[in-house]
Amino acid sequence: MTQGLDTSFLKGTGVALITPFKENEEIDFEALSKIIDHVILGGVNYVVVLGTTGETPTLSRSEKMELIRFTYDQVKERVPVIVGIGGNNTASVLNDLKEFPLEQATAILSAVPYYNKPSQDGLFLHYKKLAENAPKPIVLYNVPGRTGRNLFAETTLKLALEVGNIAGIKEASGDFNQCMQILKDKPGFFTVVSGDDALALPQMACGMQGVISVAANMFPEDFSGMIRNCLKNDYEAAKKLNDRLIPAYDLMFAENNPAGVKAFMSEKGLCKNILRLPVSPLSENLHNRVKSFLQKY
């Protein structure tokens, strides 16, 4: 167990950065620079590059490395940077941990291996191997809706208690019983953050210490303000901000992430409404509902 591990960097609002594209589908680094400033000035506590929201399955290896370096350069140490590195081939992930530029990273967010549906023992051994070889702390990422396999509370707690160099978990199972079991039995240093924007407020009431958000790409000020109020136990103020955002959560995730948030951000002029296949932009009807919401927001 890593009692001395400082995991305070996970508290508050993290934002899983989108990857903006130009008309020719090349990465739009000018737009990304604007987005990074937008979220930091809006009050987020840290940024995550190469999360699923960044369309990482469609990025080349060289593009991923370029995005990491660009993010460091644009953030300029204003907030911590967490890098997403995961996959369903443990040996390949270990190679990435050696070769990706991680010197300036604060931690590594690594999703549960997808598609091959390992057992809980396989998941434990996968993360144990990563943690033993990673140059920075590992943050577990449980998102069974995408990966096809749930990291059980028992496995999460076993990793937290028995394996060093694991800072916490982004828990996006949506299962409140599972979340509360982790929060009840976790060691003190182990930080649990939400991976569900729409559930973040009640999950923080249960004891989570923050969220890695999609919506904060678009609404960094209101979303991070909501989370700060939760951390101060001012749930009345938090609810007022969250109530304003509830329709946005529904629209953002109605068809696909990041198609939803990119529709919002394109309307604000933060990026073009361009995604790489197989992800496509929102349907016209839903996009019109996004426009209507923003006119009233």
Image (cartoon, helix red, strand yellow):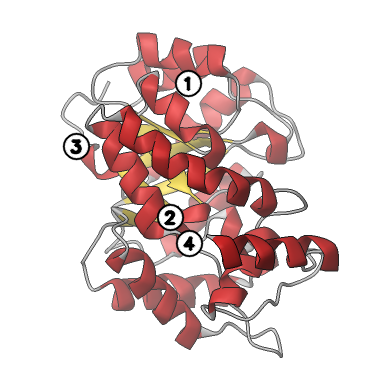
Given the current orientation, which residue lies at the most extreme left position? 4
The residue where tag 1 is placed is 156
Q: Residue at x 53, y 55 (%)?
A: 51
Q: Amino acid at mark 4?
A: Asn
Q: Residue at x 42, y 70 (%)?
A: 68
The residue where tag 3 is placed is 6
Which mark sits nearer the N-terminus, 4 or 3? 3
Which mark sits nearer the N-terminus, 2 or 4? 2
In the image, residue 177 lies at what x, y percent?
Answer: 55, 11
The residue nearer to you, when weighing 259 against 266, is 266
Task: Measure how far apart labels 2 and 4 are at the Cα level.
Answer: 6 Å
In the image, residue 99 lies at what x, y percent?
Answer: 44, 64
Image quarter hosting the N terminus: top left
User: Mark 4 falls on what kind of element?
Assistant: helix
Q: Residue at x 52, y 47 (%)?
A: 245
* Quadrant of res 159: top left
Q: Nearer the viewer, mark 4 or mark 1?
A: 4
Q: How many marks?
A: 4
Task: Measure how far apart labels 2 and 3 are at the Cα level.
Answer: 20 Å
Q: Amino acid at mark 3?
A: Asp
Q: Which mark is residue 15?
A: 2
Q: Label 4 near label 2: C-beta < 8 Å?
A: yes
Q: Label 3 near label 4: C-beta < 8 Å?
A: no
Q: Amino acid at mark 1?
A: Thr
The residue nearer to you, when weighing 177 against 5, is 177
* Quadrant of res 102: bottom left
